[in-house]
Amino acid sequence: MRINKGDQVLVLIGRNSGKKSRVVSVDKENGKVTVEGVNVVHKHVRRSRRNPQGGRLSMEMPIPISNVKIICPSCSKPTRVGARFDGDGTKYRICKKCNANISIIAPPKKHVTK
């Protein structure tokens, strides 16, 4: 899974298909992602001390990670994401269309000398 929190994504499938938004959270274990303003449901809440008025609360529910595609910050197109190592050992996420670096996955490894 190469989609992280804060990435700009395009929703491919569902009633919100075609919508561009930001990733709020990623659940790698279940393969789900929560996207801002997508898959909004209403939860009916009874009156309580925490919620004295009661009523309907809007919540964003997770969608499968396969239903979104990341938008490259440099070419602004929806794309697949790959990984590449730099000369010093830094690992980057890259755009498969324009081959530009999206972000750093892992910093360079420090070599231990004896």
Image (cartoon, rainbow, N blue to C red):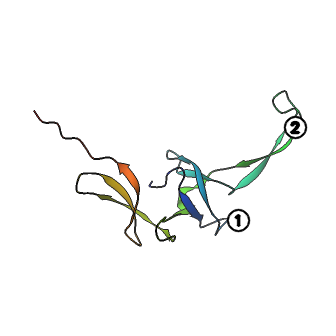
Circle 1: residue type: Arg
Residue situated furthest left in the rendering: 114
The kind of secondary structure element at disc 1 is loop
Quarter containing the C terminus? top left
Identify the amino acid type marked 2.
Gly
Q: Nearer the viewer, residue 89 or 32?
A: 89
Compared across the picture, whether 110 is left or right of 93 comes to left
Mark 2 element type: loop
Name the residue located 17 percent from the left edge and 36 percent from the top edge: 112
* On screen, residue 111 above or below 35: above
Tell us which disc is closer to us: 1 or 2.
2
Q: Which mark is drawn over residue 76?
A: none
Q: Mark on residue 54?
A: 2
* Residue pictured at 86% horizontal, 35% vertical: 46
Specify few, some or many for label 2: CA neighbours under 10 Å numbering under 14, 14-19, or 20 or more: few
Q: Which residue is mark 1?
A: 15
Quarter assignment of residue 1: bottom left
Residue 2 location, x and y as percent? 44, 55
Q: Position of residue 107 (x, y in %)?
A: 32, 46
Left or right of 96, for residue 12:
right
Q: Position of residue 109 (x, y in %)?
A: 25, 44
